[in-house]
Amino acid sequence: MVTIKSAREIELMRAAGKILGKVHQDLGKELKPGMTTLEIDCIGEEMIRSFGCIPSFKNYQGYPASVCVSVNEEVVHGIPSNKRILQEGDIVSLDIGVIYKGYHSDAARTHGIGEISKEASDLISRTRECFFKGIHYAKAGNHLHQISAAIDSCASGYGYGIVRDLVGHGIGSHLHEDPQIPNFRKRTRGIRLCPGMTLAIEPMINAGCGNVKWLSDDWTVITADGRLSAHYENTVLITRGMPEILSITEDEIAEGIWEPGGCI
Ligand code: MF3
Ligand code: CO
């Protein structure tokens, strides 16, 4: 069942998203070569708690950390470790979920460590572009799979592989709510979008083919061909006009990729 959030729920989700945007912005600036992925998780968890939030991923279906840290060919759900050290040239996806007064926000960003290849920086910026092409259609009256198709066209146009085994989702008082939001074109229209729906839209895009496999830790998803993967996710509120990106960062707004209330 797809829920419509009340004005009170929307206020709480705005607050959760704003905190999550701040956590992403601050944690992204901590990343440097020589750091372990466990250190990233520890700093992230402390930030989340300092804002009065609970890290939603911790212990979710047994996931052991607060921040999913996925390096290079790791797509999502990498488990932080004191053995995994970031190196110059790596790309690292941070996926973070917070709960504020019972309401969730979920967002992901991929960062480069020091100087990265053009292939890597293109993949990161174009994955973000896929998200923005998608949410152009995220408004009341449109159908859900218009978002999926726009993401697909953008990624396919660059010759990238789209991860099909994992999808976006509704979000609210639970981390995962209906509907599922594929990042690829469907033969159906999907549900009609209504004001007050809140969605986590999250393209996971691979430099090579879209196929993935799971490591033996049962969490870490990696590309089947070992090539790079990037992830960009925000919690989004559907309105009558352009959507509100609840978890956007201040830096992104300053950069001008998104004007609250309008897509550029
Ligand atoms: N953004 C991911 C998702 O929506 C985060 C889940 S990670 C988990 O599925 F650890 F919580 F499972
Ligand atoms: Co998500």
Image (spheres, rainbow, N blue to C red):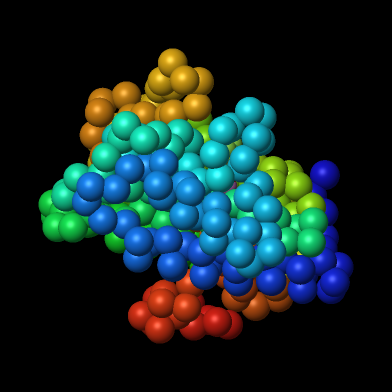
Residue at 29% from the left image edge and 48% from the top image edge: 35
Whether residue 206 is visible to the viewer of this picture, yes or no, is: no
Q: How many marks?
A: 0
The quadrant of the picture occupied by the C terminus is: bottom left
Residue at 79% from the left image edge and 56% from the top image edge: 102
Q: Out of 15 and 239, give the one closest to the viewer.
A: 15
In screen coordinates, is 206 left or right of 45?
left
x and y percent of residue 51 in the render? 63, 67
In screen coordinates, is 165 left or right of 170?
left
In screen coordinates, is 10 left or right of 95?
right
Q: Out of 63 and 106, give the one closest to the viewer.
A: 63
Whether residue 39 is visible to the viewer of this picture, yes or no, is: yes
Residue at 48% from the left image edge and 72% from the top image edge: 249
x and y percent of residue 257 in the render? 40, 76
Seen as rendered, the residue at the extreme top is 216
The quadrant of the picture occupied by the N terminus is: top right
Q: Quadrant of residue 192?
A: bottom right
x and y percent of residue 34 in the render? 23, 47
